[in-house]
Image (spheres, rainbow, N blue to C red):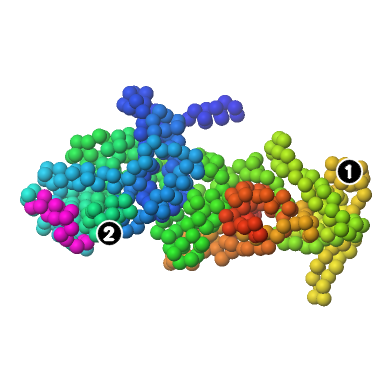
């Protein structure tokens, strides 16, 4: 087993293998990668995979990674998104060498477009988008030349300059590459390089009214930054031919594009357009709603950077797309929080328990370890009183066989406290159980138990008088089906109606010292994180994840 593990550590994925070969053969002295998000939304778990890949490669191999914002579509972009993206990358533990924007290159890209016109490789087209689509053909039928394809170089130069000067309204003209309208790759059938768009840009203001298309900005930006390995998801594979064609025609640094498979996550959607819909229509409270698959949403829910990076490492890099079970992401955060989260006792659904042989008004201070997984994690004080809360589910009047929690005549241990025995059940006028009366077994205190009694059940509890009321938000998966985006009809029809439940709970007083974002294991209930909505008078906790995969158990 040890040998196999060692071998696995040394094995390279296909991208690492390419880079290793490039460095060993002297093709490059160092590699340069880039993470190029469009600032039109918040980053999500899919972006985290790309971040870990691009930055991870330049941690493993000599080189560096640039952060470049693909800000070529001014109507959807905003500085709010720029700042959130930077915060998310830093939070994940990565640093970029250069912070760049595609808009940094607008002048250079315009010059490249003029160069293509001068070479007879680009022309201004007056066709509407509908006319262009009709002339494009199909994958089995060749396209037809635009009636404007054979304009002279001089006319194209003049018209393109007028486009830049703002002489034409939106959609009136485009600049297209002159390649081949019969090409088997539809993207090579005279693709659009520039369009007219009179829109305020978040960085350049109103300096430009023409903007480059993604395919024209992407490869050229890579080349200007001397990116050696430009990593894209598989849907960009057909674009690679155009990427290479433009670099070759312009005679610039030969960056190269490589594709890897996108990893889709079940029970969620990662389309920015769909996520924006959820935000704008109020299905969630914002981009950082803890049910959202955004990095900021996961952070607010209580996920750690280590758990997300671990998840991305586990799913790896491949050439074939597949659906990843969100249970793996939940496994990663459980693994991490089990090691680092402070333990606290919180009762979510309280049932009053009275210890009849414990003095009224007395508070006995007990101690309990903060985290048994951490050596010398310290202890906190627990107030033990006559009246306590336990979970309703921890008491059963008519217990099933092998029920080891509290029941009439049965004994259990209260965590870090005493063994108790249930003596009496108190009900209201409707027959509902409102209280259980118990007696404390002498000499049974945890750590000093000389009672000689062994019990199989241990319950968590809090004091009714010394506990702290909490607002606890029980988050679950946002969608009720595995592939909401792939279903017929509106994807929002498949939202999980039980994705959020808010309860008033009671926690041990040590929780008053909690800080925003701090993670806890609420004993026997799950992992929780203190939310930023908390105030001195109202503590709010988000459930990060349950202790076990309840969905697998319930067969949902």
Q: Name the residue tied to disc 1.
A: 449
User: Is 448 situated above or below 421?
Assistant: above
Query: How busy is the neighbourhood of tag 1: few (under 14 within 10 Å), some, or many (20 plus)?
Result: some
Q: How far apart are the alpha carbons under marks 1 and 2?
A: 75 Å
Precedes in sequence: disc 1 or disc 2:
2
The residue depicted at 8 percent of the width and 52 percent of the height is 155
- Asked whether the residues under the numbered discs 1 and 2 touch, taking CB atoms below 8 Å apart as contact, a structural biologist would say no
- Residue at 30%, 37% in the rendered image: 225
Residue 151 bears which disc, if any?
none
**Taking the image as drawn, is residue 115 in sight?**
yes
Q: Is residue 408 magenta?
A: no
Label 2: which residue?
A: 199
Could you tell whether 556 is left or right of 440 in the image?
left
Residue 68 or residue 10, whichever sits in front: 68
Image position, residue 205 (x, y; %): 28, 54
- Secondary structure under tag 1 reads loop
Residue 48 place in picture, x, y as percent? 46, 45
Instruction: Tell whether position 162 is magenta.
Output: yes
Q: Residues within 10 Å of mark 2 (few under 14, many from 20)?
A: some
Q: Image point 58% across, 58% down: which residue?
A: 533
Q: Secondary structure at mark 2?
A: loop
Quadrant containing the C terminus in the rendered view: bottom right
Closer to us: mark 1 or mark 2?
Answer: 2
Q: Is residue 543 left or right of residue 299?
A: right
The magenta segment = 155-171
Residue 418 sits above or below residue 501 on the image? above
Q: Image point 18% across, 39% down: which residue?
A: 249
Give the overall secondary structure of the magenta segment.
helix
């Amino acid at each position: 087993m040890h040998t196999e593990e060692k071998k696995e550590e040394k094995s390279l994925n296909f991208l690492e293998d390419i880079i290793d070969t490039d460095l060993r053969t002297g093709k490059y002295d160092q590699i340069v990668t880039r993470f190029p998000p469009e600032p039109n939304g918040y980053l999500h778990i899919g972006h985290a995979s790309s971040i870990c890949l691009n930055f991870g490669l330049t941690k493993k191999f000599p080189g560096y990674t640039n952060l470049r914002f693909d800000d070529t579509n001014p109507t959807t972009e905003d500085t709010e998104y720029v700042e959130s993206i930077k915060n998310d990358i830093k939070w994940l533990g990565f640093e970029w060498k250069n912070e760049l924007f595609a808009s940094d290159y607008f002048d250079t890209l315009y010059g490249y477009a003029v160069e293509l016109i001068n070479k007879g490789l680009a022309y201004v087209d007056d066709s509407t988008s509908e006319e262009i689509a009709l002339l494009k053909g199909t994958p089995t039928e060749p396209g037809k030349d635009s009636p404007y394809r054979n304009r002279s170089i001089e006319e194209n130069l003049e018209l393109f300059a007028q486009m830049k000067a703002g002489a034409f309204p939106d959609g009136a003209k485009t600049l297209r590459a002159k390649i081949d309208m019969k090409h088997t790759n539809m993207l090579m059938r005279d693709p659009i390089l520039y369009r007219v768009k009179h829109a305020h840009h978040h960085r350049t203001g109103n300096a430009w009214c023409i903007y480059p298309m993604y395919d024209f900005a992407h490869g050229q930006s890579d080349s200007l930054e001397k990116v050696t390995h430009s990593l894209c998801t598989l849907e960009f594979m057909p674009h690679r031919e155009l990427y290479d064609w433009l670099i070759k025609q312009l005679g610039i640094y030969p960056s190269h594009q490589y594709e890897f498979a996108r990893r889709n996550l079940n029970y969620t959607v990662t389309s920015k357009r769909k996520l924006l819909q959820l935000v704008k229509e109020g299905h969630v409270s914002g981009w950082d709603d803890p049910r959202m698959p955004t990095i900021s949403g996961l952070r607010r829910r209580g996920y750690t950077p280590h758990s997300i990076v671990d998840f991305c490492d586990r799913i790896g890099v491949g050439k074939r797309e597949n659906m990843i079970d969100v249970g793996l992401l939940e496994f990663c955060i459980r693994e991490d929080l089990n090691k680092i989260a402070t333990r606290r006792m919180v009762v979510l659904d309280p049932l009053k328990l009275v210890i009849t042989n414990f003095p009224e008004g007395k508070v006995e201070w007990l101690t309990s370890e903060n985290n048994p997984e951490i050596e010398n994690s310290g202890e906190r004080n627990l107030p033990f009183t006559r009246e306590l809360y336990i979970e309703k589910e921890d008491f059963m009047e008519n217990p099933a066989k092998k029920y080891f929690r509290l029941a009439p005549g049965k004994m259990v241990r209260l965590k870090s406290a005493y063994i108790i025995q249930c003596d009496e059940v108190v009900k209201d006028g409707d027959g509902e159980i409102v209280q259980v009366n118990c007696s404390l077994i002498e000499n049974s205190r945890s750590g000093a138990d000389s009672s000689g009694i062994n019990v199989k059940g241990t319950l968590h509890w809090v004091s009714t008088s010394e506990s702290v009321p909490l607002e606890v938000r029980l988050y679950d998966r946002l969608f009720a089906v595995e592939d909401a985006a792939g279903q017929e009809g509106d994807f929002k029809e498949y939202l999980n109606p039980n994705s959020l439940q808010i309860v008033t709970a009671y926690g041990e007083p040590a929780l008053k010292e909690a800080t925003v974002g701090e993670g806890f294991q609420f004993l026997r209930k799950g992992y929780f994180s203190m939310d930023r909505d908390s105030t001195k008078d109202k503590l709010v906790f988000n459930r990060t994840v349950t202790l076990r995969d309840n969905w697998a158990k319930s067969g949902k």
